Each structure stands twice: as C-alpha cells, then as structure tokens.
Image: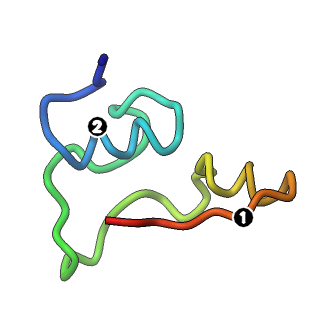
Amino acid sequence: MYSTSPICTPSRAGLLTGRYAQRVGPRWVVFPEDPEGICEWEKHFGDVLSDAGYRCGVYG
C-alpha cells in the first residue's frame, strides 16, 4: 500500500481526496478538539459517490 505521508492525518486526507497530502492541508496530526483540518472546499470521494447516488458512511 502506498501512502503519501508517514503521519496519519495527512495520509488519511490524501486517501480521502485522492490528492497529495501536501496539497490537501494538514501536515500534522489533527485531534478532534483542533479547530483546523481539511479545507471545507476540498471534495472527498464520499462527496463524489454521494452525488452519483451511492449511500456513504464512516465505520470504525
């Protein structure tokens, strides 16, 4: 498996958006209480699939 970053938050952002982690936003680990994260204008795979009629969810 290829990951765009050795840190969890940027690598997850890269997997969710399909972009390089350096272009998505967070370059550090983001915790739930942090005010920053992925930019609101960034489109995720879930957004694209929902627009195509799929039902998406997050588990785990």
Q: x, y (%) of residue 10?
A: 27, 42
At 30% from the left edge and 17% from the top edge, which residue is drawn? 2
| Element assignment for label 1 | loop
At 62% from the left edge and 55% from the top edge, which residue is drawn? 46
Q: x, y (%) of residue 4?
A: 30, 24
- Residue placed under numbered mark 1 in the picture: 55
At 28% from the left edge and 37% from the top edge, which residue is drawn? 11
Q: x, y (%) of residue 35?
A: 27, 77
Q: Is residue 6 left or right of residue 3?
A: left
Residue 9, relative to residue 11: is it above or below?
Answer: below
- Residue placed under numbered mark 2 in the picture: 11
Amino acid type of the residue tagged 1 in the rendering: Arg
Q: Nearer the viewer, residue 28 or 3?
A: 3
* CA gap, disc 2 and disc 1: 24 Å
Q: Which of the image's four quarters has the C terminus?
A: bottom left
Amino acid type of the residue tagged 2 in the rendering: Ser
Q: Who comes first in sequence, dot 2 or dot 1?
A: 2
Q: Which of marks 2 and 1 is in front?
A: 1
Which of the 4 image quarters holds residue 29? Answer: bottom left
Q: In the image, which disc is placed on residue 4?
A: none
Which of the 4 image quarters holds residue 24? Answer: top left
Q: Residues within 10 Å of mark 2 (few under 14, many from 20)?
A: many
Q: Are circles 2 and 1 on residues that touch, CB within 8 Å?
A: no
Q: Which of the image's four quarters has the N terminus?
A: top left
Q: Which of 57 and 8 is in front in this view?
A: 57
Q: Is residue 13 left or right of residue 52?
A: left
Q: How crowded is mark 1: few (under 14 residues within 10 Å), some or many (20 or more)?
A: few
